[in-house]
Amino acid sequence: MKVSISWLKNYVPIEMDVFDLAEALTMAGLEVESVQDRFGYLDTVRVARIEAIQPHPNAERLKIVRIDTGSGRASVVCGAPNVQTDMRVPWAMPGTELPDGSAIGKSVIRGKTSEGMLCSEAELGLGFDRSGILSLDPTLAPGASLAQALSLSDAVIEIDLTPNRPDCLSVLGIAREIAAIEHCRVNYPDSSLVDEGNSIAAMTSVRIESPDHCPRYAARLVTGVTVAPSPFWLQDRLLSVGLRPINNIVDITNFVLMETGQPLHAFDFDRLDENRIVVRTARPGETFVTLDNSERVLDQDMLMICDGTKPVAVAGVMGGLNSEIEDDTRQVLIESAYFNPRSIRKTSKKLGLSTDASYRFERGIDPEGVIAAANRAARLMVEIGGGRMVDGIIDEYPNRQGRAVIELGSAHTNRLLGTDLKRDQIAALLRSVEFEVAPGNAQDALTVTAPSFRVDVSRPEDLMEEVARLHGYDKIETTFPTIPAEGTFTVPALRLRNRIKQFMAGCGFTEAITYSFISRHFADRLRLRADDPRRRAVVILNPLNEDQAVMRTSLLPGMLATLAHNLSQGSRHLKLFEIGKVFIANQPSELPLEIETLIALWSGPRTPADWGKKETPCDFYDIKGVAEALQQALKVDGLRYTASAAENCRYTRAGYSADITAGNKIIGSIGEIHPQVLTNFDLKAPAYFFEIRLDELAEMIPDRIEARPLPRFPAVPRDITMIVDEALEAQGLLDAVMEMEEPLVESLHLFDVFSGSPIPDGKKSVSFRLVYRSAARTLSDDEVNALHKNIGAGLIKRFSADLPA
């Protein structure tokens, strides 16, 4: 938002230096990005005295003018008819850049050297007169800066506003903030009108068919206008904030827009079919040509301003060619409305069309400022355009917007802000920016009514922010929290997260942090079933791009994308992990289910190659070993790895994947990424992963760890080999042994699996070792042999196994 100090001074007295004002505005929450003098280009324009004038030998209408520059002499070729000897004139030195963009240099004109240029007021941007050189006060000394000689200085401040402060997208909005800083009042422009009747109702009408999109629409009518260039003061105001003057009618709407923050639109009343306005949404397949001469295809939820038969404007965004103000316009219908910010934001984004009007509408304007802005524009059109006001105003307001009424406690405010302000001080601060304040129900409370232009204020915390910035952030003392001497405990979830991070780093894995937003096509790329809960993704209403359109339901897509990026950079040995939340959508009225998850991904060689060993690629058992080691580090019992059914192996390779289960509940998965999924993510190297729910895992971690003494008596190992069905999981055999609950069985583990000749087809040989030990005595061989034989017999019977020949 740009605004000039001279414009601001029309509404509020400014006593501060402009740089002090910029600092004060920044400290009040309106960050000033730059301060520039809009007449800074006049620094290289000097006062010169004409010493002599000679005819140009090669051009009848040109003259060679000899000037005194104050520091020497110069010769300038000039064609102005009013140059006279001893005249004081503005001389643009070589290197000057004029407001129209032309650069002045030393040139040769018809064979004669011209050092710079003598300028008219129009060329200097100081008026409209182009008929001759600007004549200056004859008492001015040659060599003086023109800006100083004419006392021309007008600082323009540019403010970077946050989206929650649409009230400051106007000169009056900035003036209100300055008034609070300077402890004075804003002098609002007079927009009152005396209407002798309501004859406008006999000439036109407004019908709102979509009140949710357009809560308020007002219109005024001015007849007998003459479209012409605007007076210099109006053009100068617009130029000071970077707007290009067009004609007096359009310039007035832009002037009021910048002054009040209320966008307006001027229609040529005679070009409106049936001389009336209909506010409705677009019809299916409807098209419209906007003022930029582009045909727009409209959606059914886009709000349109129409006459009796056709659209004439995209509401809140841009008008149409079919009703624009032209040189022969004589009657003007002024539109001043309040549109639903969400509707305008969607329309502007879909059309790819952003204007000064849409920028303000989509952030929220003052619904109660609609009439004042319409009246202000109508008065100016009468004064500048020579028109006649039609009595009355149309004000359709079917969906009234209320003001926020908030109860604010001073004690609570001071506690949160770290201040010690009295209730009256808080009230005074809020009143300085036009909040209505009255005593509240409690002794220390205030009842605050937000002004209609503060659409961002709806709760006590918003008022506290106002108090803090108006009081001054620099005046709030720095305090430190009380730190107790006794130790504190971290949150259990944080402790678990840190333990896992330390363990994974110890295993050589690097932590990755991926976006919570992923592509809406992730489920198809992962080949998820149609009924998979992970297809219930939360859709982002305003995604940054197509690759961040939904919230992730799995950490795997982000990790695969990270893997692809690293592989494309030449990294082959990759061991990555991430701890983060996934989001499963619930009913539309409910928040999504958030699940904290751990994922690990391994691709490339098991270890880098060196002179002592060859490079060996990692496999399923490497990643499974990491998962089992993590389980042991967390002292978790009861996790099982069960081969996934072939029909469930959507993003994993069948036969190389497993479900991680706790009891009858699946809490994770592990395996090799399916080749088709690798292709979908542009991966050419095999990858292995495990993903596990940390909320389920946390419930299995023991609260305390009990130590026991080292065994005093020797262990007795025994091996057993059985021939079982090839489809039987070895884990089933191990579980069966543990279910026998033999107290002397200390541990057991699988150490060999073999299939092929001489093992029969459809069978495999499984060998595992049992370790027997007693805590009270030394076991005898006979005792161990008998127990070992019973265990073997039980397994043979349960699994229809055979012993090797």
Image: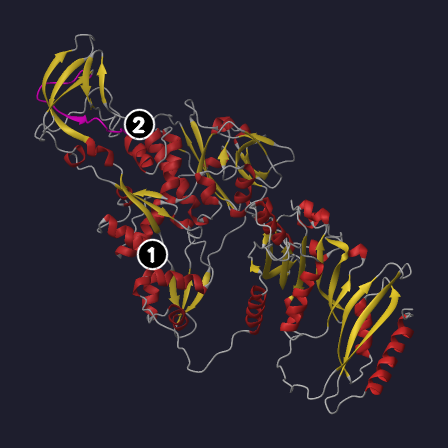
Density class for disc 2 (Cα within 10 Å; few <14, some 14-19, many ≥20) is few
102 vs 344, left or right, is left
Using the rendered image of the protein, determine whether residue 193 is visible from the camera's viewpoint: no
User: Does residue 98 sit above or below 455 in this rendering?
Assistant: above
Q: Quadrant of the C terminus?
A: bottom right
Residue 97 is a magenta residue: yes
Mark 2 lies on residue:
100
Using the rendered image of the protein, determine whether residue 160 is visible from the camera's viewpoint: yes
**Which residue: 16% across, 13% down?**
63
Q: Indicate the position of residue 462 as horizontal and vertical percent values.
A: 43, 61
User: Does residue 114 sit above or below 393 in this rendering?
Assistant: above
654 vs 517, left or right, is right
798 vs 471, left or right, is right
Q: Amino acid at mark 1?
A: Ala
Residue 40 is a magenta residue: no
**Which residue: 74% across, 56% down?**
532
Mark 1 lies on residue:
28
Q: Secondary structure at mark 2?
A: loop
Q: Quadrant of residue 310?
A: top right
User: Does residue 747 sit above or below 590 in this rendering?
Assistant: below
Name the foreground residue: 126 vs 408: 126
Q: Quadrant of residue 392?
A: top left
Name the foreground residue: 481 vs 254: 481
Magenta stretch, residue numbers: 80-102
